Amino acid sequence: MATEARILTGGQAVAEAMRQIDPDVVPMYPITPQTPIIQGFATFVAQGRAHGELVDVESEHSAMSAAIGAALAGARTITATSSQGLALMAEVVYIAASMRAPVVMAVGNRALSGPINIHCDHSDSMLVRDSGAIQLFAENAQEAYDLMLIAPRLAEHPDVLLPVLICQDGFTITHSAEPVVLLEDDVAREFVGEYRIPNSLLDVRYPTTQGPFAMPDYYFELRHQQLAAMQAALPVFEQMASEFYALSGRRYHSVEPYALDGADHAIVCLGSTGGTVKDVVDELRAEGEAVGLLELRSFRPLPRHDVRTALDSIRTVSVLDRADSPGGAPPLFAELAAALHGTEVDLRSFVYGLGGRDLHPEQIRAVFTEDSGAYIGLRGAPCPA
Amino acid sequence: MSRLKTLVRNEAGTPPLRGGHALCQGCGIPMVVRTIVDTIDTPVVVVSATGCLEVATTRFPTTAWNVPWLHVAFENAAAVVSGVEVAYRALAKRGGLPQDGPITFLVLAGDGGTYDIGLQALSGALERGHHFLFVCYDNEAYMNTGVQRSGATPFGANTTTSPAGVAALGKAQQRKDMTAIAVAHHIPYVAQAASSHWQDLSEKVERAAHADGPAFLNVLTNCPVGWGHEPRHAIEILNAGVDSCYWPLYEVVDGRYRLTYTPETIVPVEEWLRPQKRFAHLFTGEGAAVLREIQRHVDDEWEALAARCES
């Protein structure tokens, strides 16, 4: 039974989800634009409405380090970060994944320095693309809230045991107020359930050595186990999302097609842009254009099979990346090229919105009519290809 | 008062740190670790920074540890233990611990993981007041990676990144006073000890483990490879380090300084320097001036410490 919609920003909505989850430990360090999340949760604790232990660490590197310690000690642990904070903790995000620490982290996506900038793009998430952490992207505040509630279940599933990053676009979602329907507190709490991990570090009767040194004789196999966990994450996410649907009426999938039936041109994107693309697709469909959208809810693991199934019969697929890889392929485009390898799809690459530059509906319309990829909204002539 | 009997009893059956690890012959680290863990009267959970101890005791799929042990990275041991300690408190409140009873949270880090790359996380954890004991096994350089100079390396020492040669006299800077940096955090217990003086170390551990808040122990620990000495000379060298007042043994309890050992006769600092190959270049050519400079610095530091202990 859902409550009435409230007007909340994405940051507030995620703080509400954290209040309902009521994690044991929350290491926190401020950075724009995620700060409303940790401030919101700290306020709930001060009000006695949440009971987690706050750890006001001295850097994001220490936030993730403390989170690993807490999670492996047997405490449900949530943190949040953005941009430089994610870059600083990147080393430890990799280790969290390799140690199978099911830490949940809210990410307010923000451009990386330099130049320093506080607005949205996805370069921070892409920096930890290969870390072994799961990354789910929300389109709006409601999705950020919903995915945040699903996250602990996914992270802590015995077949998964990986960090989960719930990504929402900085400012566009974190600071924009919109209607959000929350679950009732007891329903949310029951859905999330108790935290359990296989081997608590605090079990002194059965001492464990965690984080040992592995040489060429074992390292490869240990890393490969992370791949198995990532692969398990896809069906586990579908299962958790289906349980969540039964409670909320809101259904999520790792890839979400929109008006793809009969489309001969589709856009693929992550995050809040999906909402704008849906509006444009609606307009163009009303005008008789056969266009659609494939939104990726899960960037890691990349649901390669479902992506291919959804797109392999579409003539043109335009990939919108909100990050670039100087000297290489933009990250989402590279994923799509791999997923669609061997198909006849005409795949195009667009880079947009770096450092928070707006993407307007007319520019999305132009994507559907362009003959080739482009840097959308870039002033001056782009570098020669 | 620590008794050898107690320590020996705690080594019986399943010693906290078992033999068979890969630390070098004559390395001071295992002696320090065993003295510490055997002294603590509650179960311990150990967090290690990356370094000799970590690498040599946990090569997968083996482990030398019979107590819970966690390693995450080089610079963050104090942050990791913060999370573990807070998790313990959170679970104790909620009734979710695997077993009842107190646990001592112990960090073991080298001087690199303490003075240098680990300093920020350590400072943060001390400031936040977590209940844990941070032990630096200070062998005065990055020994695990092949004897590179650290913030703990003393003036004049020859290391692989501060080599002595015709144009250089070894490390050109004084080491930082890490013990004083810990004191500046106004935590309940800070002490300096040496692996040669096991009883002094054990007594300090006892007080540190019962401190109401963070405790910091800086333990001078020999490294035969990096210092350049025969394993059998380790204790003599460390004794000279202590008796020359190069490395005074003292503690700071709630801000009050106390010498825990006063040399009967203060020996010249040369007795500490001469048996170590890393200082050999100071005993040739123009080294005499550097030796005088080192002696002067040790005397000044000792005088300042003695004044703090008297006041």
Image (cartoon, coloured by chain):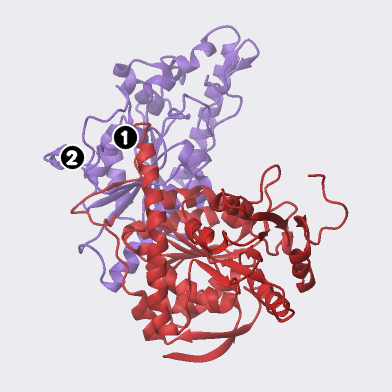
Chain colours: A red, B purple
Q: Is residue B76 above or below residue A104?
A: above
What crowding class fits label 1: few (fewer than 14 Cα within 10 Å), some (14-19), or many (20 or more)? some
Question: Left or right of A133: which side holds B41?
Answer: left
Kindly tell me whether residue A51 is visible in this rendering: no
The residue carrying mark 2 is: B15
The residue carrying mark 1 is: B59
**Residue A321 position in % (x across, y down):** 67, 58
Q: CA distance from mark 1 to mark 2?
A: 18 Å
Kindly tell me whether residue B182 is visible in this rendering: yes
Label 2 chain ID = B
| Residue at left offset 17%, top offset 37% | B4
Label 1 chain ID = B
Quadrant location of the C terminus of chain A in the rendered image: top right
Question: Left or right of A141: which side holds A376?
Answer: right
Q: Are marks 1 and 2 in contact (CB under 8 Å)?
A: no
What crowding class fits label 2: few (fewer than 14 Cα within 10 Å), some (14-19), or many (20 or more)? some
**Residue A140 position in % (x across, y down):** 60, 75
Q: Amino acid at mark 2?
A: Pro
Q: Considering only order in the chain, which callout, 2 or 1, is on the residue closer to the N terminus?
A: 2
